[in-house]
Image (spheres, rainbow, N blue to C red):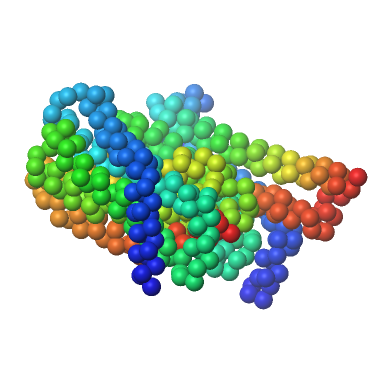
Amino acid sequence: MQWASLSDFWAMGGYGLYVWGSYLVTFAAIVLEIILLRHGHKDTLRRLRRMRRWEEQ
Amino acid sequence: MLRFTLTVIRRDLLLAARRRGDWITSQFFFVMVVSMFPLGIGADPNILRMIGPGVVWVAALLASLLSLSRLFADDHRDGSLEQMLLSPEPTVLLTLGKALAHWLIYGIPLLIITPVLGIQFALPGEAILILVVSLLIGTPILSLLGSVGAALTLGLRGGGVLLTLLILPLYVPALIFGASAVDATLAGTGAEAHLSLLAAFLVMCLLISPWVAAAALRVSVE
Amino acid sequence: MAFNLYYYAAPATFYGLAGRLIPWFAWGSAVLAAIGLYIGFFVAPTDFQQGEAYRVIFIHVPAAWMGMFIYLVMAFWSAIGLAFKTRLSFMMARALAPTGAMFTFISLWTGALWGKPMWGTWWVWDARLTSTLILLFLYIGILALWAAIDDRNRGDKAGALLTLIGAVNVPIIYFSVQWWNTLHQGASIKPSGTSMDEIMLAGMLIMAAAAWFYAIAAALTRVRTIILERERHTDWVKRILEQ
C-alpha cells in the first residue's frame, strides 16, 4: 500500500486530474451504456406489448 | 465478357457528354476547394509548397465523393439499373465498368487541372509531375472504393453525406501514399517507393472492390 | 458442441440461453474489475519512470484491445452471416458495434489523458493513435449506415459488407499510417519501462478480462432486444409478452 492518506490517493502523485479523468469518463461511458441497454430492452418489451394489445382489439 | 464492361463504359460516357452540367460542377468544385486554402492560410510560398500536395489530394477525395453519390442513382431512378442487373452478364462487370467510367469522366480531368493548381502552390516542375502521376494511379482507387459506397448507400436519405462517412476512412492509404510521394520528391528522397505502394493498393482495390460493389448493389436493389 | 449448434443458433433458444448467461458475465465482469482495480491502485507499485500516471494503463490498454478485437469479431459474424445466411450472425454484428465504438472512444480518451503528463501533449499523430482514430471512424460509418437503412435485411447485409471491406482495409491503413509517421518523423509513443512489473501486467490482464466479460454481457443484452424486435410475430415472443 503506497497511499499514506485519502488525499494522497486522490492526488495520484500530482497526476490526479489525468488518472481520475480517465477513470471517470470510462465509468460514465459504461454506466451510460448499461442504462441505455436496460432502458432499450424494457422499452422494446413495453412497445411490443402495446402493439400486441392494439392488434388484438 | 469484357464487351459488357465496355458497353457500360461507353453508355456512361455518352450520358456524361449529354449532361455536361454535372461534370463541370465537380471539376469546378475541385478547383475552388484547392484555391480556398491559400486564402485561409496565407500566401507564403514555403508553407504553400508544404501543404500543396495534401490539399490537392484531399480536394480530389472530396470531389470524387461528390460525384460518386450519383454513380448508380440515375440508372436506379429510370429503371435501367434493374434491367442491367437482370441481364445474364455478371454484376461484377457492371460495377467494374461503372467505376472505370467514373474514373474516365471525373478522374482524368482532375489530372489535367492539377498542374495549374500545382503552380498556385509554388510547387517545382518535378513535384507537379509526381503529383499528377500519383493522382493518375490514385484516382482509380477513389472510383473503385467509392463505387462500393455508392452501391451501399443507393437510394438512402442523406446518401451523399453518408457516403462520405463510409468511404473517407477507406481512402486513407491512397491519400497517404499519394501525398507522401510528392513530399518525398520535394525532400529529394525519390517517390518510387510511395508510388509502388500506391500501385499495389490500386491492384488490390481492382481485384476486390468490383465484387463487393456488385454484392452491395444486389443487396440494395433487392 | 457441433451437434447442438443449430439448436442454439435458433433465435428462440438463443434468447433464453443469452438471458441465462448475461448475469454470469455481468457479475463476472464486476468481480474481475474490482480485483483488477484493487491490484491497479493498491498492490501495483509506483512506476519509477511515470509515477502514478501510468495507472491509466489499466483501462487504456484493455479498452484499446477490445476496440480492435470487437471489430474483428464483427467481421467474423458478418462473414458467417453472408456465407451461411444465418440470421443470428447479423444480429450479433449489430449488437457488438456500439460497444466496440465505445471502447475505441475510451482508448482514445484515456490515451490523450495519459499522453498529456507523459509526453506533454494531448494528441500526437502517432501511428497507433491515428489508426485507432480511423477505427473509430469505421465504427461510426457502419453505425450510420445501419441507422440510415430501414429495411432490416438490406441493413444486415450492407453493414456486413462494409464491415468486411473495412476489415480488409484496417491492416493497410495501419501500415500506411506507420509509413506516413516514419516519413514525417512524428513522435512515436512506446510504452516506457522496457519490462513491465509482473503485478502491473497481472492487473492489466485482469482488467482486460473484465472488459471482455462486460462486452459479452452488453452484446448479449443488445442481441436479446434485437431478437425480440425481429421475432415479434412468432408464438414464443407472444408468450414472453404475455408474462
Question: In x, y percent, where is residue B179?
Answer: 22, 45
Q: Is B10 positioned to the left or the right of B200 in the image?
A: right
Q: What's the residue at 53%, 66% (across, down)?
A: B86
Q: What's the residue at 42%, 42% (across, down)?
A: B164
Q: What's the residue at 53%, 60% (across, down)?
A: B82
Q: Is C182 positioned to the left or the right of B100 in the image?
A: left
Image quadrant containing the C terminus of chain B: bottom right
* In this view, C227 is above or below C129: below
Most foreground residue, C59 or B97: B97
Q: Is B153 positioned to the left or the right of A32 in the image?
A: left
Question: In x, y percent, where is residue A39?
Answer: 70, 39
Most foreground residue, C35 or B64: B64
Q: Is B135 positioned to the left or the right of C209 in the image?
A: left
Q: Residue furthest right?
A: A57
Q: How many marks?
A: 0
Query: Can residue C239 be seen?
Result: yes
Residue A47 falls in which quadrant of the image?
top right
Most foreground residue, B29 or C104: B29
Q: Residue furthest front?
A: B18
Image quadrant containing the N terminus of chain B: bottom left
Q: What's the residue at 33%, 62% (across, down)?
A: B206
Residue B221 falls in which quadrant of the image?
bottom right
Query: Can residue B177 be seen?
Result: no
Question: In x, y percent, where is residue A13?
Answer: 40, 28
Question: In x, y percent, where is residue C220?
Answer: 64, 53
Q: Residue furthest bottom?
A: C3
Residue B94 falls in which quadrant of the image?
bottom left
